[in-house]
Image (cartoon, helix red, strand yellow):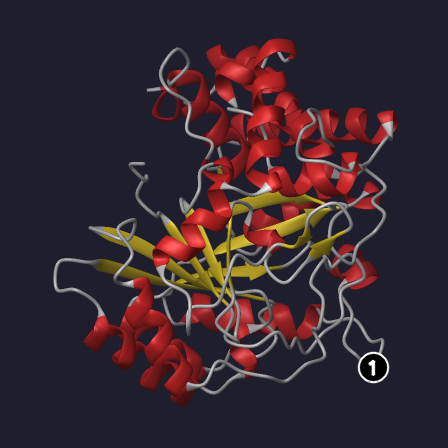
Amino acid sequence: MEYCQTSLLVVQPTPFCNIDCSYCYLPNRSSKKRLSFDLAETVFRKLFSFPTIREAVTLVWHAGEPLVLPTSYYERMFVLIQNLAPRDLQIRHSFQTNGTLISETWCELIKAWQINVGVSIDGPKEFHNRYRKGRNGAGSFDRAFAGLQKLQRAGIPCHVISVLTLESLRQPDRLFDFYVDNAIDDVCFNIEEQEGTNAQSKFVGNSSANSLYWSFLRRFVELTIERKKDIFIREIESSLHAIRGHGSLIRNEQAEPFRIISVDCDGNISTFSPELLGLRHELYGSFSFGNLVHDSFEDISARVLDSRLYADIRAGIRECSSVCAYYGVCGGGAPSNKIYENGSAASTETAYCRAFMSAIDIVLDLTERLPPELTA
């Protein structure tokens, strides 16, 4: 089998998180285990021998709060990785952080290594603090926002990920003003997803939530047009990209073996949706396909290709292609969403699918009004 190139490598430096968001899907976020340097040398040496890792890869430090470990940890880790990587492999490091621990020292490291940074802020304080609380129960907004401001003062570009809730969906103008007033020009909207330890979501099976999302996103886009504000909206950009590519081969990265590789702090390896790392399910058991200390690529690959998970992912995509009018701009959806909403990867529509459909419809409806630089 000829494998596709790995585009995203998710590495868990630690499962620990210093805050406790009510909608978080990650298990074991009280564990203070960390990826040791000795284990990291074994893990990256093995990964760099994979036939799928070539030319360039984005390495995201995630699946826990990466900044709970000191800057000295990453200074040493980045050098270790640099020394092990093939000379022709380009590696772009990335942090996805809750922002509460960002300091001037972190800014220096980020600039020195040209690290891509995403900060999770759910909008104004009243929205953010409702779900994103510290372990003492207090809201985390003030610390997260202070971290974002440190990045901005240091001239470090970053994007903001906001989890949309039923409360914030009702106030698109409030969120828009928050981003504009605070010089946030790169925004990604996530919906609360039902997966992992987050066993329920207000979006699943809620038709009013679907309607609210459509109204929110349309109004938000209209505001960018009316007020001529240059805000990058991931959902609109990805919809435009999908529409422009309609008729060509749609790549569903979460459905292709090893397109995305996830590794936890013990060296266990997973693939497909990165959210599956460290999770279990009654139908599939563990989503780990081996351990990089003692398993070869051939061993891991055989388990992936022979797994019920992969068979069900392909079955679900076939079903999507036959019943969904949006398949040509989607490619079959995310396995993690299907598993935890529908009970199996061999299924079709999810809450995220409906959100994606809304974005596509909005872009098609507003194409003539969108700025030329977006539709080019």
Question: Where does the image place residue 167, in percent across and percent down from the top left?
Answer: 84, 45
Left-right relation of 260 to 55: right
Q: Is residue 259 above or below residue 144?
A: above
Residue 75: % across, % down: 33, 84
Q: What residue is at 82 percent from the left and 31 percent from the top?
A: 209
Q: Nearer the viewer, residue 208 or 55?
A: 55
On the rendered structure, is 76 left or right of 158?
Answer: left
Q: Quadrant of the C terminus?
A: top left
What secondary structure is found at the residue carrying circle 1? loop
Quarter holding the N terminus?
top left
Q: Which residue is mark 1?
A: 136
Q: Nearer the viewer, residue 65 or 26?
A: 26
| Image quadrant assignment for residue 154 | bottom left
91 displayed left or right of 9: left
Q: Is residue 185 visible?
A: no
Closer-to-camera residue (154/360): 360
The image shows residue 135 at horizontal and vertical percentages of 79, 79
The one nearer the camera, 133 or 296, is 296
Badge count: 1
Residue 144 figure quarter: bottom right
Residue at left 83%, top 41%? 166
Q: Does residue 90 sit above or below 264 in this rendering?
A: above
Q: Residues within 10 Å of mark 1 (few under 14, many from 20)?
A: few
Residue 60 at what x, y percent from top left? 44, 61
- Amino acid type, residue under disc 1 in the picture: Asn
Furthest toward the left, the residue is: 87
**In the rendered view, would you say 160 is above or below 229?**
below
- Asked whether residue 245 appears in the rendered view, the answer is yes
Residue at 39% x, 25% y: name it.
374
